[in-house]
Image (cartoon, rainbow, N blue to C red):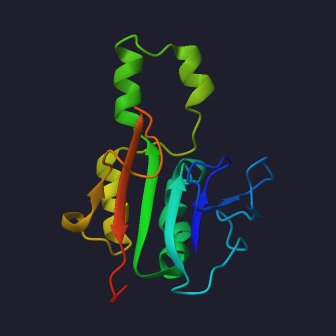
């Protein structure tokens, strides 16, 4: 099984899980909550997390992501896809992004950059030296303002 945590389908062969019903949602469950959807350990082959971190407070990030990592099979892939706050700030300061567009498109509870994603993945048991950064040819289109980093679950996690 493959899942994507996002309000809109971005990966053709993965179920869409989101906290409210949308036209693409397959499973409505608030993963941000301790009462949200629980997956059987070692039952999911790939998880694509699109913007989940931006929708929760920084102090809850690890607690929300740990059950997802437990659900991954050994060798399973965990993709974190988040808006790169460093990129967004450079665009805002450089005049490529208006304040109006920033307020409309980049409203988050938590802002994140590549160093923080690397740290979060390391804390979840994915060593930095084994993390894979986004490359052309992945199963979904990358926006300029996104960071995509993948960790692969080993047998010891």
Closer to the camera in the image, 124 or 79: 79
Image point (41%, 69%), residue name: 77
Closer to the camera in the image, 40 or 123: 40
Q: Quadrant of residue 156?
A: bottom left
Q: Is 30 situated above or below 44? A: above
Image point (31%, 71%), residue name: 126
Q: In the picture, which quadrant includes the N terminus?
A: bottom right
Residue at the outermost top position:
95
Residue at the outermost left position:
129
Please give left or right for residue 122 compared with residue 44 in the image: left
Residue 61 is situated, as x and y percent measured from the top left of the image, at 50, 61
Residue 121 is situated, as x and y percent measured from the top left of the image, at 35, 65
Q: Is 52 situated above or below 85? A: below
Residue 57 is situated, as x and y percent measured from the top left of the image, at 56, 53
Image point (34%, 34%), residue name: 86
Residue 49 is situated, as x and y percent measured from the top left of the image, at 52, 57
Q: Quadrant of residue 29?
A: bottom right
Q: Is 82 situated above or below 106? A: below
Please give left or right for residue 17 compared with residue 82 in the image: right
């Amino acid at each position: 099984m493959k899942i994507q945590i996002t309000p809109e389908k971005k990966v053709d062969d993965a179920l869409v899980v989101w906290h409210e019903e949308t036209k693409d949602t397959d499973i409505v469950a608030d993963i941000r909550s301790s009462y949200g959807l629980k997956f059987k350990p070692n039952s999911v082959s790939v998880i694509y997390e699109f913007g989940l971190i931006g929708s929760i407070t920084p102090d809850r990030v690890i607690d929300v992501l740990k059950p997802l990592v437990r659900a991954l099979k050994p060798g399973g892939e965990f993709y974190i896809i988040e808006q790169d706050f460093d990129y967004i700030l450079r665009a805002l300061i450089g005049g490529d992004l208006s304040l109006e567009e920033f307020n409309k498109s980049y409203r988050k509870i938590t802002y994140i950059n590549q160093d923080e994603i690397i740290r979060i993945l390391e804390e979840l048991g994915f060593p930095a030296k084994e993390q894979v950064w986004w490359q052309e040819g992945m199963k979904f289109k990358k926006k300029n303002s996104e960071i995509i980093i993948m960790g692969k679950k080993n047998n010891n996690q």
